[in-house]
Image (cartoon, rainbow, N blue to C red):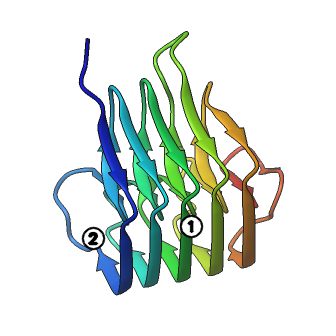
Amino acid sequence: SEVPCNIHDFVLKGTSINTALQEDNVTAGGILGFGMNNVHVYNCTVNMDNFTSTDAQTSIIWGGIAGMMSTRCSIENCESNITTITTSGLGAMIGGIVGSASPTEGVECKVIGCRSNIGEIVVSNTNEPYKCKVGGIAGQVNGCIMAFCLSNCTRISNGYTGFTDNEDHDYGV
């Protein structure tokens, strides 16, 4: 049996993250980049000025709390407060709490009781055939339980909120 990894009661204040000119794909988060196999983040807060990814040739998976969550992982009672999120990466998955939450089939992954407050999300890569998935809570979710979450996002630019724009970019708050 796997030993759980618990990250809790952590506050990150007043930072900016810039992933410009990365040679590889980037998975990043305010607290955790990638959680897999029994990782639990709870009661954490991220207060960030800016997340910026300006390398249009790099795939970006980014979340205010975690970049990516997978098998038997959870994010609970966490909050992210971010002034601006800017990306031009290929196939970006950007979320106020988690960039991508995709557990192994039949294994639980949860995002419960989280809140994100985002000033603006700017997506500037509209190149085919890459899809950008952007959301106030999650950029992409596949088989993950999400409940009792709230997102306050002032603006998502270069797209529409709540539906698919010509199947190129998915936006939602």
| Image quarter of the N terminus | top left
In the displayed structure, 18 sits above or below 74; it is: below
Q: Which residue is mark 1?
A: 79
Residue for point 21% across, 70% down: 21
Decide if residue 154 is in sight here: yes
In the displayed structure, 128 sits above or below 126; it is: above
Residue 129 placed where, x, y %? 53, 44
**Of helix, strand and loop, which one carries label 1?**
strand
Residue 120 placed where, x, y %? 64, 81
Callout in the foreground (2, 1): 1
Q: Amino acid at mark 1?
A: Glu
In the displayed structure, 143 sits above or below 77; it is: above
Decide if residue 130 is in sight here: no
Residue for point 34% across, 39% down: 35
**Of helix, strand and loop, which one carries label 2?**
loop
Marks 2 and 1 sit apart, C-alpha to C-alpha, by 22 Å
Residue 117 placed where, x, y %? 65, 76
Which numbered circle lies on residue 19? 2
Residue 99 placed where, x, y %? 50, 51
In the displayed structure, 112 sits above or below 23; it is: above
